[in-house]
Image: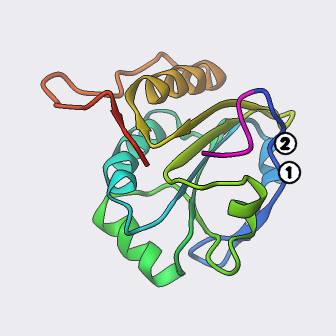
Amino acid sequence: MSKIQAGGTAPAFALAGVNGEKHSLADALKKGPVLAAFFKVSCPVCQFTFPFLERMYESYGDGTVSFWGVSQDNAHDTKEFLDEYGVKFPTLIDADGYKATKQYGLTNVPTIFLIQPDGTVKTASVGFAKKDLETIAAQIAKASAKTPQALFRPGEKVPEYKPG
C-alpha cells in the first residue's frame, strides 16, 4: 500500500543510482513522465515483476519516459539483482533511511508509479497486477508516441495478480 494514489501528487526526491550518479525526480519530469518502481532484492514478487518492467523499458525507454527502479537495498546487492534479472534501466538506491520510500508511505513492494510531467501520479500499482502493467505499458506507449507492444508473450503463464 501507499499513501500516494492515482491523481495524487508524487513527492519529489533525489537519490544516487547504483553507479553513484544523482537523479532528481523534478529534473526527470522536465523531460517527460517517470515510471518509478520501488523494490527489495529479496522480494519474490519483485523478482517476478522486474523482467516485465525491463520489457517495457526495451519497448519504450527512448528518453521520452524515464524508467527508474528504486531499491531499498545497498548498491552491491542491487547490482546483483539487476544482473540476475536482466534489468538495464537506471536504478536508484533508497537504502539509507528509506527517505523516498517513507515519503511515498510504502508498506509493500513492488510498488510502481507512473508520474506525469506535472507531478501527478497517473497510475499506482502494488504487487504484480497484470492489468495494471498492461495499462501502464499502454500509457507509456502513448506518451512515447510509439505503437503499443504486447507486454506478455503468447503461451506465457502469467497470473492476474501476486500480492507484494
Residue at 40% over, 43% down: 163
For residue 99, which quarter of the picture? bottom right
Residue 146 highlighted magenta (yes or no): no
Residue behind mark 1:
26
Helix, strand, or loop for circle 2? loop
Q: Is residue 71 left or right of residue 85?
A: right
On the image, the x and y values in percent for residue 149 come to 39, 21
The label nearer to you, 1 versus 2, is: 1
Depicted 3 relative to depicted 138: above or below: below
On the image, the x and y values in percent for residue 52 come to 36, 41
Picture mark count = 2
Residue behind mark 2:
30
Asked whether residue 158 is in view, the answer is yes
What secondary structure prevails in the magenta region?
A: loop
Residue at 80% over, 43% down: 10
Report the Cα–Cα distance between label 1 and label 2.
7 Å
Give the camera-side residue of 56 and 9: 9
Residue at 77% over, 49% down: 28
User: Which region shows up in magenta?
Assistant: 1-6
On the image, the x and y values in percent for residue 112 come to 57, 43
Depicted 104 relative to depicted 126: above or below: below
Amino acid type, mark 1: Ala
Whether label 1 touches label 2, CB < 8 Å = yes
Depicted 54 relative to depicted 21: above or below: above
